[in-house]
Structures are given as C-alpha cells and as structure tokens.
Image (cartoon, rainbow, N blue to C red):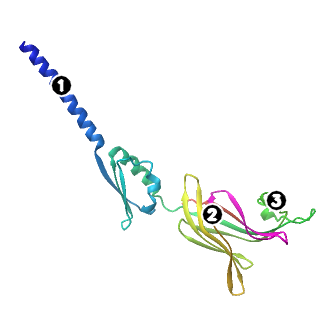
Amino acid sequence: MTKRIALLTLILLCFGAAAMADQAASTDEKTLSVFTYQFKHKLAEKAATAIKTLVSAEGTVAIQSAANSVVITDRAENLKNIAAALQRFDTPPQPVQLTVRLVTAARVEGAGGQVPDTLKDVAPKLAMLRFNSFEHLGAVNVDGREGEPGIVELGSGYRADFRFGEYDSKSDSISLADFKLSKLQGDQLTALYKTTLNLKIGQTLIFGATRDPQSQRALVVVVSAKTVNR
C-alpha cells in the first residue's frame, strides 16, 4: 500500500512538472521584447511599409521622428525578421542617371516622314499614335540620387524640373515627383505639362506635353533611367 501511494505521488509530481514546463514555455512565447532601430539613410516615417507584414497582432510600432528611429515591441522571433528587413530597407540613396529627350512629332502624308537616327528607338512607339515625322529638339543626361532635385535645359527655351523620388528595389523603379516641362517665352517661364512619373529602370517612357490637332503636331517628352554603380 505504501509503495502504491509513493508511486502515485511520483506520477502526480511528474505531471505537475510537465504542466509547469508547458506553462513556462507558453509564457515565454507570449513574452514581448523591445527593439529600437535608428536609420542612417532612410526616414523612419517610411519604415512601416517595409515591416507591416512582419509585425504580429500583439506587436506595436512607434516612430521617433526626432531621433529618426523606430521602436518595435513584439515577440523575439518576430523581432529578428523585422531587424533584418529594416537593414535591407535602410540602404544609401541609389544613384540614377536620367535621360530626357524633347521631340516634335507630326503626321505627314505619303512617304515624306523624317526619322533622325537619334529617334529610331522610339519611332515605332510614336508611330502607334500615327506620327511619322520627328524632330529632335534636345537631350540631356542628368545624374542624381533619391530625394535630390533636377533641372535640365533642353534647348529652344524648354526646361524640365523634377525631383528624384525613392528607388524601389523590388520593382526596380524610381519615381520622379512633380515633373514639369516649361518654356521660356520672353522673360516668362510658362508651364506646359506637369505630372508624377514612376519609371522602371531601363524602360523608355513617352508622353505628350502639348498637341495642336489642327497642325497635326505634338510636343513629346521621352524619358529613361538607369542605375549607376555606387
């Protein structure tokens, strides 16, 4: 009888120890830790998009604008993945070379169309708009980095102003904020066209700035970009 009582006590102690171990493991899994990351290159306010899918339902994200840092509270396992994502996000500004070309396009009857050698790469695309005669007004290459402004003089009084936006490594593209084409007329700079572009690296983007249907002519901007090795 005494042996049975001792055996039963031992079994209960084992079950109790196992239950306490399971409870401790469960408690450890639910324990939240705090991680602070201070950015060297990017703005902390823009970090949320880089980590929003990694933060758990129990986690929180606090932006510290003055210190350009982010404070994240979450489980330790999640924080490891979040820290790695933030390091990938916080990269130096990507140098980019932008090429801007200004073209006049027209519709000419018969075989009288004119295509300069410098525009043969874009002539097929412009032909889809039924243009077959082109004149190259000017072209400029401009180097810049994310966040920097750009101003290019295209000749014949035309000027393009813009700001390099963020480079997105996932889509391999860069935005051009407030791209504006203007022309100097007398002593006044007149805005002709304004837009914001999302330009894929290596892609050529063509858009019309002005068009006069009566003369069957259009002013066309051709833009392309490539990354520059750091």
Q: Tell me if mark 2 has few (under 14), some (14-19) or many (20+) residues whose alpha carbon lies within 10 angstroms of its own.
A: some
User: Pointers 1 and 3 in contact (CB under 8 A)?
Assistant: no
Compared across the picture, whether 184 is left or right of 50 comes to right
- Residue visible at 81% across and 63% down? 117
Q: Which residue is mark 1?
A: 14
Compared across the picture, whether 69 is left or right of 154 comes to left
Q: Residue furthest left?
A: 2
Q: Is residue 65 magenta?
A: no
Residue type at the position of mark 1: Cys
Query: Taking the image as drawn, is residue 192 in sight?
Result: yes
Q: State the image quarter where residue 120 is shown.
A: bottom right
Q: Secondary structure at mark 2?
A: strand
The mark found on residue 127 in the picture is 3
Compared across the picture, whether 41 is left or right of 10 comes to right
Q: Secondary structure at mark 1?
A: helix
User: Pointers 2 and 1 in contact (CB under 8 A)?
Assistant: no
Type of secondary structure dominating the magenta stretch = strand
The mark found on residue 197 in the picture is 2
Q: CA distance from mark 1 to mark 3?
A: 83 Å
Residue type at the position of mark 3: Ala
Residue 82 higher or lower than 158, as above or below: above
Tag 3 or tag 1, which sits nearer the N-term? 1
Image quadrant holding the C terminus, namely bottom right
Residue type at the position of mark 2: Leu
Q: State the image quarter where residue 15 is shown.
A: top left
Q: Tell me if mark 1 has few (under 14), some (14-19) or many (20+) residues whose alpha carbon lies within 10 angstroms of its own.
A: few
Q: Secondary structure at mark 3?
A: helix
The magenta segment is 198-221
- Measured from the top left, where is residue 187 in percent x and y? 69, 87
Compared across the picture, whether 163 is left or right of 110 comes to left
Depth check: 93 or 197 in front?
197
Q: Residue furthest top?
A: 1
